[in-house]
Image (spheres, rainbow, N blue to C red):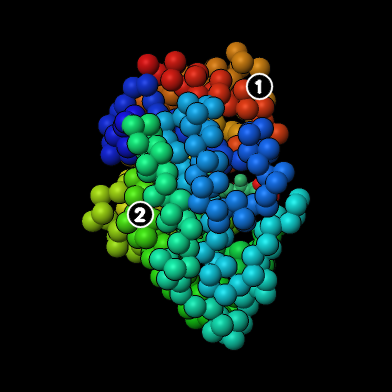
């Protein structure tokens, strides 16, 4: 098996530098679009043979060094008793939103073996189909990011309902966070038991918090989860989108790998995190619109900065966009491998 990604997670400065792309399975791939014409997104997530097929597409098409389970961070929320829908062009909708004590009382923890058995089955299929190829990454949303989706009922520009609950009713907020932490922990443990070889925790919206609020209301829950799973030997990647201002605190999360969005350059991140850190990232996803020679210059610069870390896993600074020609994504993978070998 191609072990480059896992070795880098464990701190080895691997050459060529391993690369995978957040959202590497998805709408920018014609093979994915073809399948989506016949089947809606949630059904795709819940049909293990198809979810496995879509997971493998970017491994074969792009030549990336890791596969990431095809699913969504919002899937476990549906099992907690909240409706989940993906509307074309409008993003996810969670209904009814969770804003009062009664709303929280209606929610329940999940039993992964029964509630998300399709995810675990997808993982088992993938481990067989990927054997001899690349490792499989499982994932979860972080409690804070999941809480924002529940409280807002979807995504938001201001996150006013989330911050309102946090400041007006901190006890209510912490009850919701405790419940979500329990759900995330059991979900991750079940994924590990089913066979994932690394875990990425997405904290997409934690960056909306001030440093102090992040330290108080978001990070402790992540740290607690990572501590509880430490013994498994499965490495954790923790990605906070828009998290440059909290990097200094993220250092203490206990994650083996810190994911960086494109706003903080790797050099600056390492000066904050320390040279003993494994970093993942962080090409601006829109840089894939650049002509080849300019893309190459940027990739080379990121790889050079990555040399100052303990190890570097190349990735985008956020998910790949549906507008990107897939040939460009393939070129990126070739450039990373070629320039770093
Ligand atoms: O990375 C991968 O290839 C694995 C699969 C994956 C998806 N979502 C598939 C998906 C992963 C890891 C996610 C994580 C996810 N989902 C996050 C965290 C990462 C991030 O982007 O910050 C978040 C915030 C979500 C919630 C979510 N799901 C959003 C905002 C959307 C986009 C809505 C839209 O229509 O643009 C989704 C839908 C989604 N998740 C798609 C895919 C492939 C598109 C669904 C489709 O086919 O139409």
Residues 175 and 24: in front is 24
Q: Residue at x 57, y 68 (%)?
A: 78
Residue occupying the point 63% across, 34% down: 31
Question: Quadrant of the image for the N terminus?
Answer: top left
Q: Give the Cα distance between marks 1 and 2.
A: 40 Å
Q: First in sequence, mark 1 or 2: give its number.
A: 2
Left or right of residue 2, residue 58 in this image: right
In front here: 335 or 58? 58
Q: In what element is the residue under mark 2? A: helix
The residue pinned by badge 2 equals 194
Q: Position of residue 202 (x, y in %)?
A: 49, 52
Q: Residue at x 67, y 71 (%)?
A: 95
Callout 1: 10 Å neighbours few (<14), some, many (20+)?
few
Q: Is mark 1 within 8 Å of ligand 1?
A: no
Q: Please name the residue that numbered disc 1 is placed on.
A: 290
Residue 119 is situated, as x and y percent measured from the top left of the image, at 47, 56
Q: Is residue 3 above or below residue 46?
A: above
In the image, is residue 102 above or below residue 78? below
**Could you tell me if residue 245 is visible in this image?**
no
Residue at horizontal 45 percent and vertical 38 percent from the top:
67
The answer to which image quadrant residue 193 occupies is: bottom left
């Amino acid at each position: 098996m191609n072990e480059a990604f896992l070795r880098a997670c464990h701190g080895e400065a691997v050459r060529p530098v391993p690369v995978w792309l957040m959202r590497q399975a998805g709408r920018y791939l014609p093979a994915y679009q073809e399948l989506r014409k016949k089947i809606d997104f949630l059904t795709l997530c819940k049909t293990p043979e198809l979810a496995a097929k879509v997971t493998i597409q970017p491994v074969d098409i792009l030549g990336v060094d890791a596969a990431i389970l095809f699913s969504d961070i919002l899937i476990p929320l549906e099992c907690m008793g909240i409706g989940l829908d993906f509307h074309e062009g409008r993003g996810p909708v969670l209904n009814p939103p969770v804003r009062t004590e009664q709303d929280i009382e209606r929610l329940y923890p999940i039993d992964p073996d029964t509630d998300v058995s399709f995810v675990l089955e997808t993982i088992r299929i993938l481990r067989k189909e990927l054997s001899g190829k690349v490792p499989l990454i499982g994932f979860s949303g972080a409690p804070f990011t999941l809480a924002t989706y529940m409280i807002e009922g979807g995504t938001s520009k201001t996150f006013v309902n989330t911050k309102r609950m946090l400041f007006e009713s901190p006890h209510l907020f912490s009850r919701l966070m405790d419940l979500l932490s329990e759900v995330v922990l059991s979900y991750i443990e079940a994924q590990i038991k089913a066979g994932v070889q690394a875990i990425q925790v997405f904290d997409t919206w934690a960056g909306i918090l001030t440093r102090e609020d992040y330290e108080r209301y978001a990070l402790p829950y992540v740290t607690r989860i990572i501590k509880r799973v430490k013994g498994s030997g499965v490495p954790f990647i923790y990605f906070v989108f828009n998290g440059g201002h909290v990097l200094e605190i993220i250092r203490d999360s206990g994650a083996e790998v810190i994911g960086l969005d494109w706003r903080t350059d790797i050099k600056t991140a390492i000066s904050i995190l320390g040279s003993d850190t494994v970093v993942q990232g962080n090409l601006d996803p829109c840089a894939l619109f650049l002509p080849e020679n300019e893309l190459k210059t940027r990739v080379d610069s990121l790889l050079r900065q990555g040399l100052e870390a303990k190890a570097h896993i190349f990735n985008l600074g956020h998910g790949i966009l549906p507008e990107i020609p897939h040939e460009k994504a393939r070129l990126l993978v070739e450039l990373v491998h070629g320039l770093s070998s």
